[in-house]
Image (cartoon, grey):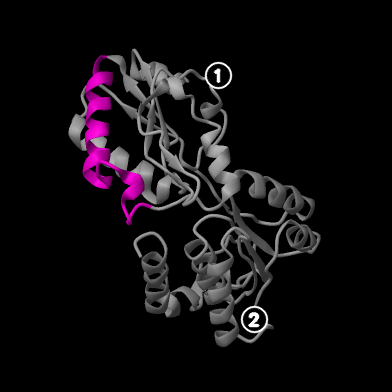
Amino acid sequence: YMCEIGLTLSELTWIEKHIHRLTREKRVPTHWHSSPQEVSVPTPYGTVLIMILEYPVLLTLEPLIDALAAGNTVIVKPSAYAPATSAVMEMIIKETYPPEYVRMITGGRQENQALLTQRFDKLFTGGKTVGREVLRHAAEYLTLSPWNSVGKSVIVDSTAKIPLAARRIVFGKYLNCGQTCVAPDYILCDVSIKDALLAAIQKEITRQFGDRPLDNPDYGKIINEKHFERILGLIAKEKIICGGESDSSTLRIAPTVLTDVSWDDPVMGEEIFGPLLPVLTIPLVDEAIRN
């Protein structure tokens, strides 16, 4: 509810409350050599394509709400990784909107490629792989393409309140098993507080998920087997100080903390999008900023 449905309902409520203000005519000043016309009427872009992978409810329905409120027509291409969610949203969309206003296209890579050969007036996308492909096609027509970008790191210096920092890091990192764009991929911490921070993080993992997270019914799973195996491939077992357990039958990977990680390790080479937290040390905050 917090990450998907609640935020979607909040967006809908806000738009309903402010739609009249957002769409009314506005008087704007013009330069002396321009037309004397001073009325600006909000104009829709046209047809919008929403193609997203993560948060299949929020990042599909939230931009859909905004695009429709602005007077656009919309084609929605949900993630093939969440077919059950897509089926529910397709049912809602078909019951709510005529197909000339909103149309959902399901499928995988072939459907994505077919859609991207079409010309849209605005694209909404995200993620590294899909986003790069969408933006490559958008560049051909200079199509406006907002991109849902990702977070990367957290810096913890010697002035930090260690228990509070650990609580926030554990919550933000392991939310949805790390499958969220705002999860920190790694921590840069002052070398003088490394041991204290690691101990606090381990304590917080136990507090938030229990002694055996894989047995916790409220702890989630990785979206599919492909990404389950990808994430396991990023774990250097000799660098685990906490977690590392997994269950292939449920696609669960325990909250895992890695230390003594270098920039050359596989886990540092890509967006993790899973419950792995590498911790790197730095002597000074200025060095972290330079890196």
Residue at horizontal 53 percent and vertical 38 percent from the top: 231
Give the overall secondary structure of the magenta segment: helix
Relative to 286, say whether 135 is above or below.
below
- The residue where tag 2 is placed is 101
Relative to 279, say whether 214 is above or below.
below
Specify whether 15 is left or right of 170.
right
Pick the quarter of the image with the N terminus. bottom left
- Dot 1 lies on which element? loop
Looking at the rendering, the stretch of residues picked out in magenta corresponds to: 192-219
The reply to whether the C-beta atoms of the residues labelled 2 and 1 are less than 8 Å apart is: no
Tell me which label, 2 or 1, sits earlier in the chain.
2
Residue at horizontal 46 percent and vertical 40 percent from the top: 151
The alpha-carbon separation of the residues under discs 2 and 1 comes to 49 Å
Mark identifier at residue 264? 1
In terms of image quadrants, where is residue 253?
Answer: top left
- Dot 2 lies on which element? loop
Mark identifier at residue 108? none
Q: Nearer the viewer, mark 2 or mark 1?
A: 1
Residue 56 shown in magenta: no
Tell which residue pokes out farthest to the top in this image: 283
Name the residue type under label 1.
Asp
Front position in the image: 59 or 289: 59
In the image, residue 50 lies at what x, y percent? 62, 63
Q: Residues within 10 Å of mark 1 (few under 14, many from 20)?
A: few
In the image, residue 45 lies at what x, y percent? 65, 68
Tell which residue pokes out farthest to the front in this image: 249
Residue at horizontal 66 percent and vertical 50 percent from the top: 130
